[in-house]
Amino acid sequence: MLPLVILLVIVLTALVLFIGGWLPVDVVGLMVLAALALTGLVSPEEAMAGFSSPAVITVWAMFILSAGLTRTGVAYRIGQPLQHFARGSETVLVIALMTAASILSALINTTTVAAILMPATMDLARRSGRPPARLLMPMALGCLLGGPFTGISTPPNILATDALRAAGLTTFALFDFTPITAALVVAGIAFTVVVGLRLLPKGAGSGRDTGALESSYQVGAHIFSIELPPASPLVGRSLVESRLGSALYLTVVGLHRAGELILAPRAQETLQAGDLVIVHGQTDQVSRFHGSRHLRVEPDGPQTGEVADRLEVVTGLIGKGSSLVGRTLAESGLRRDHRVHVLALGAPSGECLGDFRRHRFQEGDRLVLQGERAALERLAGQGLVEGLMPVTQAPAGTPACEELSLCSVRVPEGSALAGRNLIESRLGNAFGLTVVGLVRGNDVTCLPAPEETVRAGDLLVVQGLKRDIDVFEGLQDLEISEQSSRLAAELESQQIGMAEVLLSPRTTLAGKTLNDLLFRDHYGLSVLAVLRKGRPARAGLQDMPLQFGDALLVYGPRQSLEAVARDDDFLVLDQAAAQAPRLHKAPLAAAVMIAVLGSAILGLAPIAIAALAGVAVMVVTGCLKMEEAYQAIEWKVVFLIASMLPLGVAIQNTGAAQMGAEALIALVGDMGPRWVVAALFGVTVLGTQVIPTAALVVLMAPVALGAAASLGISPQLLMMTVAIAASSSFASPLSHPAHLLVMGPGGYRFTDYVKVGVPLTVISLVVSVWLLPLMWPA
């Protein structure tokens, strides 16, 4: 009697600690293990046997195999069909997820299915913008509900069939379990979507923590989409030519095209009619250039012709002693001080420089200049240039200019550009256009100074290439078609990621701009924002000198993130985001997993041995590194299972389980088969909370067969009751490894399993008591 009392105290104490949540569950497990060994309820060998148990080995091996499937992209592909439901309602998403989990569990070991679907479910949660806690437990429940579909799909089914065979009775056929399991799946899914979702926590869980990025950068609030009109001048142009980045300070992070989502498109990607362009930035940058509000293109009038007539284009040479030598274009003051515009520049070597803004003038440089005659003559008179002559008479080797066009733009009342100077209007840097004339009332100013303030009602005469003017007009027609934080959840995939990058203490890049570094060209990544002194900047990033302590939010291919992580100038904070999937290893990883499952199903090797062999092959063949294998194991789960397994041994050693079951059967034996089924189901379900299901079926099989013989009830009815009840382990994280797999990533507490699992267990009991006697008449 004393051993039973001690056992009861240990079990009740453990349950109180589990439910209270004051200690981590693995610590409680270790306390139970120590108490059982110290009180002599189990021998030292039995106490330590859990750590070498095939169940424990299978669990941690499955963690590693699941990581191998994830790192090679197989898990993503398995869950990819479910992505179609990510943007739908939570109810539809949960139904699809639980259905898929149930069907897979009919073919594959339940724990394995949970391990395979867990990364796919985490990805679903991220894409749908929902906390992982809303999806992980339904996925685990779907695995458990669908587990008993066939006679070989779960250990309880296999053991129940073996018990009938050992007793010389008719055994179950392969699909005898299918009707009752299908009914339980339907009932379980219905319960989960109607009631269970209301009981699940709304916390974010502990998956990959994007909360810090969202908190610092508010990415979701700055993701929106722009629909490209069919007649837009931007159609047929590349993203670079569209000037969405340089003009509007927007970063194109994706394209929705014909139902397909293209993430992190290349700068050379050509825009097509009907494209939905997903961008990151500030919405006011789009509205700022919208024609109806801030700029209005007008037909060319007489003032435009006057500007064109007053401006001349000449060529000149920088001679010896010119004060321009050694200066850049910005330092020269040619536009600001002399009202002269440089159209092209040729080096003394004869090379025509495309981008000459950073070029330092040298003696012998040949310039193509535009300005009024008086301004050009003053330039020559001051010795800045020499040999001025019309371009039509220029000598050989003079840099050629593409044909330029003029466009008239009115600044309406209420324009955001009113009160800003021409530099702040960014017409030059953003669009490649030059304001060559300003018409204010009856006054016409040619080549106004960059510091000239724009007023409402002004007419700006801008000059540029025909294609740049077309782009300018095309950008004016753009309007935001959708702005939603949910768009941000779709921007990452197994190949495309987002990460925060810091300048390392050893950096040599402080003081340089992203333009200086050619960051996008060199690394293939877009910088969405720069966090400086706790505040994110999104505009003008290319020309912002970097400072030590800056954090860059970068977006692009994970292979590029890996390259940045290897650069000594940077520190990537989220190493997981910088891991590109080993897609070339995907067929091999899939073959390893199929071989593991096939070996176990066909009985060629125990599942634990097959899983260990699979782990070894995964590591040796490079599907997974050993460091990644160690990191993949949820050690809390491993210690919990290993610590709790001796409790089942103690219950068997003390005879507590059999005494309780026999007493309960004796109480309801005279009340009919349905009451016997209900009692046997209840006892078995209670046992699953602390006893491994395989051990529980072995323990309950003699009780069920004995009750069937003494009461004249169908042994198949009672054995199926035991098998189904053993698989209805919903109410405790300890009751099945699938629950333990999702406990940490979902951020669940013990009570979460109780709230959802107890009602679902009752439903399973009711369905079983109703259907099983019909399927197997007593």
Image (spheres, rainbow, N blue to C red):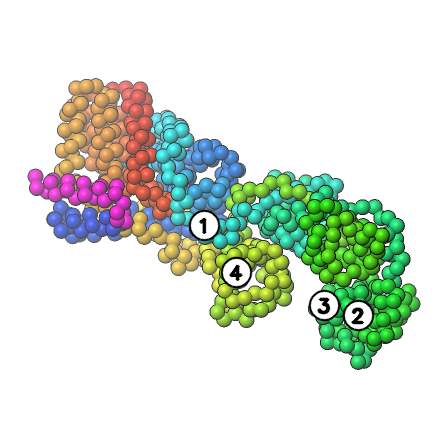
Circles 4 and 1: CB distance less than 8 Å?
no
Q: CA distance from mark 3 to mark 4?
A: 27 Å
Circles 2 and 3: CB distance less than 8 Å?
no
Helix, strand or loop at label 2? It is strand
Q: Residues within 10 Å of mark 3 (few under 14, many from 20)?
A: few
Asked if residue 327 can be seen in this view, the reply is yes
**Residue 267, magenta (yes or no):** no
Left or right of 47: which side holds 71?
Answer: right
Chief secondary structure of the magenta portion: helix
Q: Residues within 10 Å of mark 2 (few under 14, many from 20)?
A: many
What's the mark number on residue 532?
4
Q: CA distance from mark 2 to mark 3?
A: 17 Å
Whether 53 is drawn above or below 452: the answer is: above
Whether 176 is drawn above or below 564: the answer is: above
Helix, strand or loop at label 3? It is helix
Callout 1 amino acid: Gly
| Precedes in sequence: disc 1 or disc 3 | 1
Q: CA distance from mark 1 to mark 3?
A: 43 Å
What's the mark number on residue 115?
none
| Precedes in sequence: disc 2 or disc 3 | 3
Residue 323 location, x and y as percent? 77, 77
**Image depth: mark 2 or mark 3 in front:** 3
Helix, strand or loop at label 1? It is helix
Callout 4 amino acid: Arg
Q: Nearer the viewer, residue 693 or 295?
A: 295
Q: Provide the residue designation for mark 2.
A: 346
Q: Nearer the viewer, residue 509 or 59?
A: 509
What's the mark number on residue 211?
1
Left or right of 608: which side holds 428?
Answer: right
